[in-house]
Amino acid sequence: MLTYIYILAITAEAMSGALAAGRRNMDMFGVSVIAFITALGGGTIRDILLGHFPVSWTQHPEYIYLTVSAGLITMLIARFMHHLHKIFLLLDAMGLIAFTIIGCNVALELGYSTPIVVMAGMITGIFGGILRDVLCQRVPVVFRHELYASISLLVALLYLQLEQMGLNHDLNLILSFATGIMMRVAAIYWHWSLPVFSYAPGRWK
């Protein structure tokens, strides 16, 4: 099940990367690169930091074709994307949760301690979007809007807690995934966010 969700997730993330590239008036090559980095960048950074080689997507070239194709297709259907905004937010939420759980799994299989497992999950979940926004010269969305990175953290902690309790793995996947989706959708609907730090030097003179 997680494999199918992963495929859906990287497709959605590639499309979000293509849209961000379009806002910066990039050409087809730029769109393809940003789409690929958005979809697979988090997992790549995770694998490098954990010493997990070969990097996962190098063993699955079909993921390259999928992400680049999703980016290019987005160029053709971009004019209709605003009609699919809500669906796209749901797909993005699915990607965040799926990547987080996958990242935790990889770190667990490598025998890392709990803090590293949690960080691996979060890096996989959010770093593709961070790379996308940095390359597109924007403040990363994960730091500005409704709860996003925090959802990744909570999902990682929940998944590990249920794993340590000995819950059936498939049931753990379902519960963690469903809980993460509900939290992310609730954050979007009710605009939940962390306190914002706003600093203006002149104000304190």
Image (cartoon, rainbow, N blue to C red):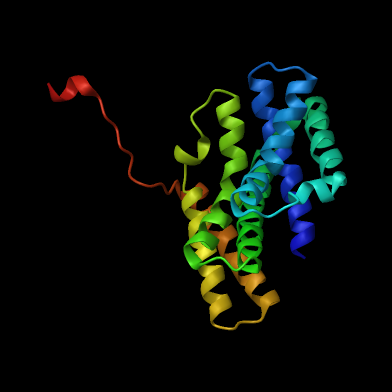
Which residue is farthest left?
205
Q: Nearer the viewer, residue 157 or 116?
A: 116
Kindly indicate the quadrant of the structure image that contains residue 131. top right
The answer, for residue 190, to whether it is visible in the render is: yes
Kindly indicate the quadrant of the structure image that contains residue 127. top right
Residue 158: percent from left, percent from top: 52, 69
**Location of the C terminus (image quadrant):** top left
Q: Nearer the viewer, residue 110 or 44?
A: 110
- Considering only vertical position in the picture, is 32 above or below 155? above
**Location of the N terminus (image quadrant):** bottom right
Which residue is farthest bottom?
166
State the residue at coordinates (29%, 32%).
198
Left/right placement of residue 181 relative to residue 31 reads left
Residue 69: percent from left, percent from top: 84, 35
State the residue at coordinates (59%, 58%).
181
State the residue at coordinates (51%, 74%).
161
The answer, for residue 82, to whether it is visible in the render is: no
Q: Nearer the viewer, residue 68 or 15?
A: 68
- Considering only vertical position in the picture, is 107 above or below 99? below
Kindly indicate the quadrant of the structure image that contains residue 133. top right
- Considering only vertical position in the picture, is 87 above or below 186? above
Left/right placement of residue 138 relative to residue 192 reads right
Left/right placement of residue 191 relative to residue 15 reads left
Residue 60: percent from left, percent from top: 84, 49
